[in-house]
Image: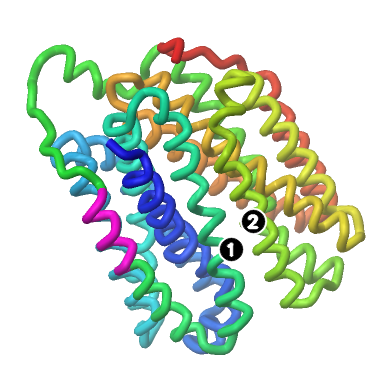
Amino acid sequence: MNAKKIIFPGIAMIAVCYTLGRYSFGLFLPEISASLSLSTTDAGWISSVMYIAYCLALLTAPFLIHKWGHYQVIRLSGISVVVGIAGVALAPNTLILTISLFFAGLSTGWISPALGNAASTELPVADRDRGNVWINSGTSFGMVLSGPIALLFTEYWRLSYGLFAIIALITLYWNSKNIPHRHPIASATTKDQHQFQLFQPHSLALCVGSLLIGSSSAIYWTFSRSFLTVEQGLSYTTAIWFWIVMGISGMIAGSSGKWINRLGLSASYRLGMFMMSIGIIVLIIPSVGFNFASAILFGISFIFLSCICIVWSTRVYTKQPSMGISLSFLMIGAGQFVGALIAGNVIDLFSYSVGFVIFAGLGLVGLLIKIKTNTTA
């Protein structure tokens, strides 16, 4: 089938679920907190709820895809994020806000395995890696979209989320029209049961590598903007542009499929971890130029690494790609959750700069990972 009919709507759905549904909460947090009288503790609990929803969805995604097919799970993700974003726009209190963001969080855990499975089964073999990589870069497209909206409608966060809900609804319709609707073939054979074994040969390296990506990047995702505004005195507008530059840079990683094939998974992973570590440590240099250089390096490398994880997953879990993608992204999420907690304590005990140096060093541990897969593709 025409690859564009899966890749383009897939990019849009990733952008909607991850950036508009999940990450934009951080962009509008000051305004939401002021409007709904949220404390820092409340904001922390809400972020934890989104993470819990993300993990629950990742754990259930392979089984839902096996039972219903990726088409229905993509639709489920779209409905979930529309409900979540619309709920945020209308939320009168903390409870409704939390429930709405829980639905938005569910969409992120379902959509990556579902779209990864769609690309791995619907696209020709020659287009699968490239398709998966481009789809995953949707997060960056979403950052580029949400940043200017945050600049234009900073004081009107409900209006922004209302606009996000309309975009999400259009994206859901687009995916529903383009992604093939195929019913899964039920089977109880030993071969099919083997597909649901959690661990496959060479999956340990995938888990450890994904965990390192999540843990080492956690300090950047959680504290980079705080560090720039608190320690280096960047304005709100400059900090938003920092976010937008990260997104634009991540879009470059959408063309990384050919580089993964050319360099090989192992060399690509090491290159990505090295670039991300350099991006993390460069941030502490007190210069706006170096700050934006850091955003470029981190934006490219993080999306590149998450693309590598998708390709890596599909080559380890050749029979059930959604299982591998779910496991890899679960490890990334777990690493980010634990890494953020540790980073906060390190910053409190020492300083922002010491924290960024330590986590950059953690990223360099990834250079030791040896990658093997169950396919030569």
Query: In the rendered image, which quarter is residue 84 located in?
Result: bottom left
User: Relative to residue 82, is residue 63 depicted above or below?
Assistant: above
Whether residue 98 can be seen here: yes
> Residue at coordinates 61% horizontally, 41% vertically from top-left?
215
Residue to which mark 1 is pinned: 144
Query: In the rendered image, which quarter is residue 105 located in?
Result: bottom left
Q: Main secondary structure of the magenta part?
A: helix
Residues under numbered marks 1 and 2 in contact, where contact means CB atoms less than 8 Å apart = yes
**Residue 238 percent location from the top left of the image:** 76, 72
The amino acid on which the numbered mark 1 sits, given as a three-letter code, is Val
**Residue 9 percent location from the top left of the image:** 36, 53
> Residue at coordinates 10% horizontally, 29% vertically from top-left?
185
SS label for mark 2: helix
**Residue 207 percent location from the top left of the image:** 49, 27
Mark identifier at residue 36: none
User: Relative to residue 110, is residue 241 depicted above or below?
Assistant: below
Task: State left or right for residue 17 relative to residue 254.
Answer: left
The amino acid on which the numbered mark 2 sits, given as a three-letter code, is Ile
- Range of magenta residues: 169-178
Label 1 and label 2: CA atoms lie apart by 6 Å
User: Relative to residue 102, is residue 28 depicted above or below?
Assistant: below
Task: State left or right for residue 191 relative to residue 248.
Answer: left
Whether residue 214 can be seen here: no
**Residue 173 percent location from the top left of the image:** 25, 62
SS label for mark 1: helix
> Residue at coordinates 28% horizontally, 54% vertically from top-left?
175
